[in-house]
Image (cartoon, helix red, strand yellow):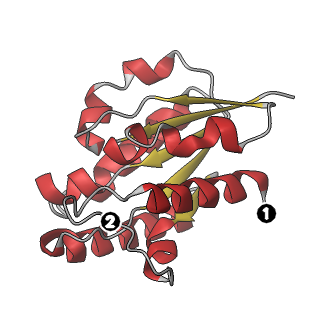
Amino acid sequence: MNRKITIVGDSLAQWSDGFGLRSRLPSEFTVTDLSVAGYTTEDWIQNQNRLNAIPTDLWILELGTNDAMVYGTSGFETRTLNLIDFLQSNQNSIVYLTLVPKTNMVSIQDTIRTNNSTLRAIQEKKPKVEIVDIESIFESYQGELPLYPISDPIHPNQIGYDLMGETYRKKILGI
């Protein structure tokens, strides 16, 4: 049985080549990464027709960092709910909401934490919506090397991207 996964995200997914899921998952999974650097939930709502044509069993929404920078917490819940409703209106699919890492950019950390709490609340109210808690994975990381390069406080290094990819892989496979 072939399972189709579509990633709807921003630069975190795009720059990591969809968290390496094409090579991390068994061959019965097909991964399509539509992520666009700089995109927010609003950008995806405005471009939702692009999503209509893709048969998908599992949507991975990896959004929130750009929302925190552009909108703060204003309207995040409404936009996210609208996007989930659209994705599930045409297909009987599951949506994974990503609790994004707070980043090393201090100015948006509280906003990301609040928006991640909003995602937890959405998940409790919506059937067929699950959480992938990347925030906790990053916060509990005990490795010797940092997860972010000094030159970029928002985009993790390969260690961070590998942590994200493994977290998604385990969630998808039920490990």
Separation of marks 1 and 2 at Cα, in angstroms:
26 Å
Foreground residue among 160 and 48: 160
**Residue pushed farthest top?**
53
Estimate the x, y position of residue 145 in percent, counting from the top left: 42, 75
130 horizontally vs 104: left or right: right
* Element class at badge 1: loop
Q: Look at mark 2 in the image and give the residue it sits on.
A: 148
Using the image, determine if residue 148 lies above or below residue 146: above
Foreground residue among 161 and 98: 161
Discs 1/2, front: 2
Foreground residue among 115 and 88: 115
Estimate the x, y position of residue 87 in percent, counting from the top left: 50, 34
Using the image, determine if residue 151 lies above or below residue 1: below
User: What is the three-letter code of the residue carrying label 1?
Assistant: Ile
Using the image, determine if residue 173 lies above or below residue 55: below
Q: Look at mark 1 in the image and give the residue it sits on.
A: 175
Corner quadrant of residue 2: top right
Foreground residue among 142 and 92: 142
Q: Quadrant of the N terminus?
A: top right
Label drawn at residue 71: none
Estimate the x, y position of residue 10 in percent, counting from the top left: 33, 42
119 horizontally vs 107: left or right: right
User: What is the three-letter code of the residue carrying label 2?
Assistant: Tyr
Tell which circle, 1 or 2, labels the residue nearer the N-terminal end.
Answer: 2
Image point (27%, 37%), residue name = 37
Estimate the x, y position of residue 60 in percent, counting from the top left: 53, 45
Q: Quadrant of the C terminus?
A: bottom right
Image point (39%, 68%), residue name = 147
Using the image, determine if residue 16 lies above or below residue 4: below
